Image: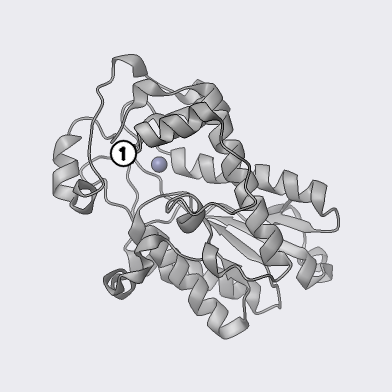
Amino acid sequence: MINLLDISWCELEKMPRSETVFFQVIAPVEEHSHHLPLGTDLFLGEIWAKKAIKILEENKPKLNCIMMPILPVAAGSMKGFPGCLYQRAKDVRKVLYSVLQNLAQFGFQNIIVVASHGDPMHQISVEKACEMINSKYGEVAISPLGSIVFSGMRPTKGANLSTELDKMLQKYKFDFHAGWVETSMIMAEKPELIKSDIYSMPDIEVTDREMINPSVYLKKTAGWGHLGYPKLSDQKLGNELNNITSSDLAIVVDEFVEKKDCSMYKHHFLWKLPIFRILT
Ligand SMILES: [Zn+2]
């Protein structure tokens, strides 16, 4: 892995455009209930990108994988909690567009945006920035997490889930924010950052229909900040979730670098509703 901040412009200039891949994590500083740090989404994006880079470096030793400085820029909806540093959706799109353009104008052909935050407005702002860049420079940028993580459209070549994880994901699927999924993933990588006794925390149950209306879920989670089941967290499941996410990401990056058709990985399922594209 190459850190962009460690190299000179001359080193970057020498890199073959088709064999260089940039990884741009973009997610919010955001409240994650009483037990998880404000940096949860940024940490997870970084973990997944680094694990995916490790897989790619083994499979494609000629590839230069460059980690970009992380962008703490995002649209979000957990209003009323200190520590949420949100931007407007259009501003997210504009900032990311300018970052992508700075790379694309020098002929770089592979920019992977790791948008590790599930809010549809964030996902669609990011996807729109990629689409605008691609309409100007060709297929150079992709943000696959809206599809492969947040819409459940995993690559067909992706590894099978263990029976235990599969069961949990089906049974406790309404685990939208700082619940067992995110807590398990942080537990697997940064257990020292988990702050309170998760086993005494309440389940806060919200359906996918209720998730459409912030006033409904913000009322349910008032004083807490999670939506889901933190007490069901498990380090082993967290490790598997991180590994699956990273290996799925590596599959998409591999196909993108080979310039195969990646259209199925481009969009969150709500992209098809025009209102989201108007607001971003
Ligand atoms: Zn999160």
Residue 81 visible, this orientation: yes
The location of residue 100, given as percent across then percent down, is 57, 70
As drawn, is 280 to the left or to the right of 266?
left
Q: Nearer the viewer, residue 264 or 36?
A: 264
Q: Which residue is drawn at 70% across and 77% down?
A: 106
Dot 1 beta carbon under 8 Å from ligand 1: no
Q: Where is residue 148 in the image (x, y as percent from the top left)?
A: 51, 53
Quick one: SS at disc 1? Answer: loop
In the image, taking residue 61 as reference, residue 125 lies left or right, namely left
Q: Where is residue 123 in the image (x, y as percent from the top left)?
A: 41, 60
Q: Name the residue under label 1.
A: 174
Mark 1 belongs to which amino acid?
Answer: Phe
Which quadrant of the structure image shows residue 226? Answer: top left
Which residue: 31% across, 27% down? 34
Q: Quick one: quadrant of the C terminus? A: bottom left
Q: Is residue 198 above or below residue 25?
A: above
Q: In this view, does 226 lie above or below 256?
A: above
Q: Which residue is drawn at the image coordinates 21% and 50% (left, top)?
A: 209
Is residue 1 at least partly visible in the picture? no
The one nearer the camera, 142 or 191, is 142
- The count of marks equals 1
Colour convention? one colour
**How far from the left and from the top, in percent, is residue 144?**
53, 59
Q: Residue furthest bottom?
A: 136
Residue 279 found in image quarter: bottom left
Determine which quarter of the picture holds residue 196: top left
Residue at figure coordinates x 32%, y 45% from the top left: 84
Q: Quadrant of ligand 1?
A: top left
Q: Along the horizontal axis of the image, is 257 left or right of 156?
A: right
Q: From the viewer's perspective, is residue 89 above or below residue 76? A: below
Label 1 neighbour load within 10 Å: few <14, some 14-19, many 20+: some
